[in-house]
Image (cartoon, helix red, strand yellow):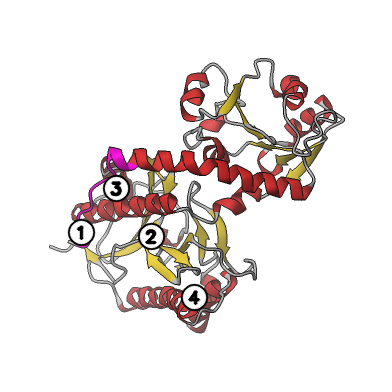
Amino acid sequence: MHVGSTAAPSAEDRQRWRLADLAARPERLDVLRASLVALGVDAYFGVRPENARYLTGFVLADGEEKVAGHSGRFFVDAAETVLLADSRYRLQAQSQAPRSRIEDTPGGLAAAWPELLGSLRPLSNDVSRGVAGIAVEAGFLDHASWLALAAAAPDVELVAIEGLIETQRVTKEPSELERIAAACAIADEALDATLPQIREGVTERELAMALEWRIRTGGAEALAFDVACLAGARAALPHGSPGDDAVRAGQVLLFDFGAQVEGYRSDMTRTLFVGQPDAHDRAIYELVAAAQAAAIDLLGEALRSQRAITNREVDAAARAVIDAAGHGHHFGHGTGHGIGLATHELPSLGRAAPEAPLPSPTVFSVEPGVYLDGQTGVRIEDLVSFDAGAGTFELLTRFPRSLTVVGEG
């Protein structure tokens, strides 16, 4: 009805992407090591699952880090990566991270910390000195663990680092772009296949489950995040969860969802209408659509004129349209966010976003919204692939953005 059929990624596609990651990791590590040398530290200790996957290949499912202990945490030194994996994850680590040295911490991380640091080759290459300072992903390590590690090796400085690998990940390799596009295609088809099930009386939860089933059986390995399906006044909850409320004629119906393909995610929002919308809801939809179009048009204009454009400018273009209509205070979040191995990553597009030019090639969402408490909510979200160097940008989300009426007849 709305989008053409696109085959799910094949086994050959998935294997090609895995091999691309394997080939890319040496350069990814070289970039990180150069950054660490510039900071004057000797090694890196990472705890984010996305960063472990990016640099070693080891995979933890969303939320699995809560039960994995120290498995999945990793070190990068001058010569190698060291991946922590207990007995539950040892074989998986050996298979997924063949270039990493696998270590266990049966007595706990703090107890093993001095020996682990002693086994690392410092980036200074002064082996006699050993590791004097190590960068730590401080934003993802609890304070008690930080104190325990500092006490376990008091001669080694823990240097709080935020965003170092995340800044690398913002620039997407060709195989990363392919996987995000594949995840978008699966999400597009899943929503299209779910439309016939939307009718008066079906609940938000039933529709969310139907959409999830379509995503999982359409070629995704997982959801990018839990499906949001919100009807009527509940659509004013930007990140609400589906409930048992029945859909009624005359309501808006907001879906926010994404697929995951070989670790990479999509994210889209569509606000549909169950039956013909009233004049008020139609006007809100048209306003949000105009705001999104203003941001997308600005990207195209900047590329055509070969003008650098900042994250904040993209946000301002969408926000100006909504402000001019008197709904600025009903648009509280940023216009967009980066996406890749995490659903929300750099670059951010908001009022507090950096004034620096947008990185490229990269992928981010464009998702203005207007939320009226107790009345309605409208958001339209698409992913954009942006490459200033090549002078191109592409809408990866293909499901139509035009006002869509469902549940009639």
Binning the other alpha carbons within 10 Å of mark 4 as few (below 14), some (14 to 19) or many (20 upward) gives many
Task: From the image, give the main secondary structure of the stretch colored magenta.
Answer: loop
Where is mark 3, residue-wise? 211
- Magenta-tinted stretch: 2-13
Q: Earlier in the sequence, mark 3 or mark 4?
A: 3
Q: Position of residue 263 (x, y in %)?
A: 43, 42
Report the mark closest to the observer, 1 or 4: 1
Q: Earlier in the sequence, mark 1 or mark 4?
A: 1
| Mark 4: amino acid | Ala
User: Which percent across, then down, holds residue 51?
Assistant: 57, 41
Quarter placement of the C terminus:
bottom left
**Residue 313 seen by the camera:** yes
Residue ID for mark 2: 269
| Residue at which label 1 appears | 4
Residue 295, image x and y in percent? 47, 75
Q: Which of 209/280 is in front?
A: 209
Front label number (3 vs 4)? 4
**266 to the left or right of 94:** left
Residue 120 drawn above or below residue 248? above
Gap between marks 3 and 4 measured at Cα: 29 Å
Number of residues whose C-alpha sits closer than 10 Å to that of mark 1, classed few (under 14), some (14–19) or many (20 or more): few
